[in-house]
Every structure is written in C-alpha cells, then in structure tokens.
Amino acid sequence: MDLRFAIQLGIIGLTFFMLVNASALLVLAERKIMGFMQQRYGPYLVGPHGVLQPLADILKLLFKEELRPKGADKWLFTLAPIISVTAAFAAFAAVPWGAETTLFGLLDTPVKLGASDINVGVLVVFAITSMGVYGIVLAGWSSNSKYSLLGGLRSSAQMISYELAYATTLASVVMLAGSLSLREVVDAQAGAWWGFIPRWYLFLQPAGFIIYVIAGVAETNRAPFDFPEAEQELVAGYNTEYSSVRFALFPQAEYINMATMSAVATDLYLGGWHGVPFLTALGLGWLVFLAKVGVLLFTYIWVRWTVPRYRYDQLMQFGWKWLFPASVINLIVTAALMLALHA
Amino acid sequence: MDGWLGVVIMIVLGVGFAAVMIGLSLLLGPKNPTPEKLAPYECGMPAVGDARERQSVKFYLVAMIFLLFDIEVAFLYPWALAIRDLGWPGFVQIVTFFLILLVGFIYVWRKGLLDWGSTARRPRRDVSSKAA
C-alpha cells in the first residue's frame, strides 16, 4: 500500500469521523441555539457550558433497554435505522469538501479532499439521499403502531413530492456548469466578476437557491416541514416505538442529512472552497467550505425555531402547485438566458 | 479517492457503525420486557386493532404521479448537459416536452390529486335527502 492510497483512506476516515462528530455537535448547537432563542441556557451541566451533553446522551441511550413492540417485524425493525444512517453517511461520500492538495508538498501528485471523486456526483448524492426514505418507511411500517405508520407514510409522500422540485433545480445548476461532477461545478465558480463579486451560482440562480433550500428542508424533514414527527399529531412519528440506540440513530441520520444538504448547497451555489483567495492559496480552502456549511446549518436551526409548522395539506399543495412549477420555469428561463448570452 | 471505492467504503463504515452501536446497546442495556412495554404506544390506552389497516389512497396516488414526473425530470439531466451543443433547436424541443408535461400536470391538478385536506374535492353526499 503506497502513501497516496493510505492518505486517501485517511481522508475517507476523516470524512466519516467529521460526520459522526457533526451530528453530535449539531444536537448540541441546536439545543444551545434553541435555548438562547427562548431566553434560557440550554444544556449547561455536563462539562463546561454543557458541551459534553451529546456524549452523556449517547452513553445514557447505550444503557437503555431495547424494546420492540409485539406485533413488530423483527428484522425490518432493526434494519430501518441502519438503512437511514447508512444512506446518510453514503450520501456525503460523493460530496467534495476541499480543493486538490499535496498536503504541503508531502505528495508528488495532489489528492482530492473528499471521500470520493465521481464524475456523476450530483446524481449520486441525489440517488442516495432518496434511499433514506426507505429507512423511514420501513421504520413506520415495521413498528405496527398507528402513529409510526402514519408518520412513515407522510414522510414518504413529502420526500418524493419535494424531490421533483429539488431535482429540477439541480438540473439548472448542472446546465450552467456543464458537468455532473460536484468538483467541476465548484471549480466553475472560481474567480470573480469585475474583480469583486465572486462567481457563485447563487448570483446566477437566486430563485434556484431559494427553491433548493426549501426543498432541502422538506427533504430532511426539518421544521417547518417536520411532519413525520409532528409531536402534536403523531407523538414522535415514525420512531414512536423506538428506544435506546436504535432511536438515537434516526436523529443522527437527520443531522447528517442536514450536513449533506448544506454541503451540497455550498458546492453548487456558494462556490464551495472558493471565495477567500489567500486561504485557497495556502491550501486551506476547506476552512472556507466549513464556514459556509456552518452558516447554512445555523440557518437551518434558526428557521426551525422561528417558523411555525405548516399543515400537511399546505405542505403537499405548496410542493406540487408552487415549488415544482417554479423550478421548471427557473430551468427554462435559465436555459433561454444562457443560450441568448452564450451565442 | 477516485471512483466508487470511496462510496463503498463509506457504506461499509455506515453499516458497521450502526451495527456496532446497536450491538453495544444490546449488550449493555437491561432486558426485562413486560406486556405493557411491548404494547404499541397509543397514548396510554390499550392498543385497538392492528396498525396495518387501509390508508388514504392519496398516498398511493402521490407515489404514482411522482414516478411519472420523476422520470421526466431524469430526462432533463442529459439535456441539461448537452444544451450548449444543442442550441436553440434543443431549447424548442425541451419546451415542447414541457408543454406535453404541462397537459398531464393540468389533468392531475384538475382531477384534484394535488388537493389535500379540507380543500380536497370530494363527491358531496346529500345528507338531508337520505334522512327523509
């Protein structure tokens, strides 16, 4: 095994490690930010300012009893959280998070920061995130609980409805970049117009970015679209019957999916690791990437504690009657403008 | 990592992580199930019947129209990649394609498939005449 391959394996391990920690960090960030938005402290007792709270939570859950309701399907009940988490991890594998680097001259040929470099990365992310719905549907169905089943059904209908708008919006970015590789899309956004406006697709696709964010929130089942787990209606939705670690795996998958959505949005619309030239020159572009992802994740949490939950019929009608037509119009207008200005 | 190996390794890591965590909790957690604990949760009342009953047909209809429209969206990607070479003829073709899609969309809309809840179109039952 040569050094280059070992380093690439290390990058994959690092990506995995970051994702595991990101989910813990996001739980903490969410509770802290929620606390400050509601004028209280949030978790405060475990560790300084409560920073060790996620660790305490997972340890506590490890020592809790695993319960499976009597009518539940034995295998699917265990398989569902595994599918959810695996889909969440695997989706991030196709997301590049840094430029090519030689690790400050350690390697002769540069390695690419990111778990893998696939020339159809957009489609891979899109396909694997869609797989996540299987985890939720199977969890809902296998529990043999009415709340779980309703939560699972709602979630699947919601996710597939918003997938249309999501996919159509991505197509307009793909069209602008002329590539399905996320890395090439990012590199197409390097530089600046007239020297000061960064060449981000955000400025070419403002409507597309808004549609992407709304569809992304719906795809990850976050508030204001968190119908699978609408507490007032469905107790906890698809994971009502889950306990212990199997219960913990669902929110973990959700938080990783949030990170993936934000990372893809950064790659597609916010120029990925470009934007701060001197950091890019130093080979620290990934810091810029992390900062952008952080801002998007904060927005996710901010939205959750600001916007009240929709009604389910409003959600479905909004997705089909507004978001999907809007994304198609966005695509056609983009194509027309591109052809007109290109020729 | 070039190619698909990274995704495969990530899937293996994901499955391994979830399996190890579940296995650990099986080892560490207590096991004293009671009939009450094993009953499905229904707000503290004894569960009534089976959960796997008939569900609203809306969900199936949404899944069906999703399949149709998602295939159309999948057709968009090759076109989106090739638009620079196709030029205006390609643009006219995709607009024609969308117009055909629009006919289907209007049909679905008019049929009330996109309406949920209180605004959904339902055949009205005349209650007063039945009571008489």
Image: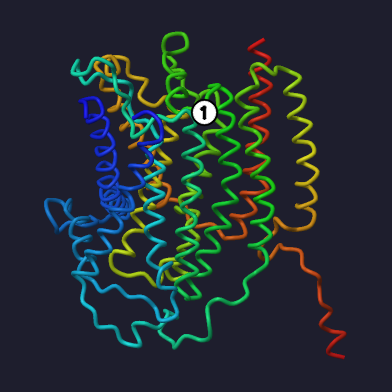
Which residue is at a point 76% across and 27% down the rendered structure image? B93
The number of numbered badges drawn on the structure is 1
Scheme by which the image is coloured: rainbow
**Quadrant occupied by the C terminus of chain B:** bottom right
Q: Where is residue B85 in the image (x, y as percent from the top left)?
A: 66, 16
Q: Residue furthest bottom?
A: B132
Residue toward you, B129 or A11? A11
Position of residue A174 relative to residue A25, above or below, is above
Label 1 environment density (alpha carbons within 10 Å; few <14, some 14–19, many ≥20): many
Frontmost residue, A33 versus B11: B11
Q: Does residue A214 lie above or below A240 as drawn?
A: above
For residue A245, side relative to residue B65 (left or right) = left
> In the image, residue A25 lies at what x, y percent?
26, 47
Q: In this view, does B19 lie to the left or right of A237?
A: left
The three-letter amino acid code for the residue at tag 1 is: Leu
Specify the quadrant that holds the N terminus of chain B.
Answer: top left
Find residue A188 and report its horizontal and vertical position in percent.
Answer: 47, 18
Residue A90, picture quadrant: top left
Name which residue lies at 55% across and 34% down.
Answer: A170
Kind of element beneath mark 1: loop
Q: Mark 1 points at which residue?
A: A180
Q: In this image, A32 relative to B96: left or right?
A: left
Q: In the rendered image of this protein, does residue A145 appear above or below residue A12?
A: below
Q: Which of B120 and A41 is in front in this view?
A: B120
Q: Which residue lies furthest to the left in this view?
A: A48
Q: Mark 1 lies on which chain?
A: A
- Could you say which quadrant of the image residue B71 lies in? top right
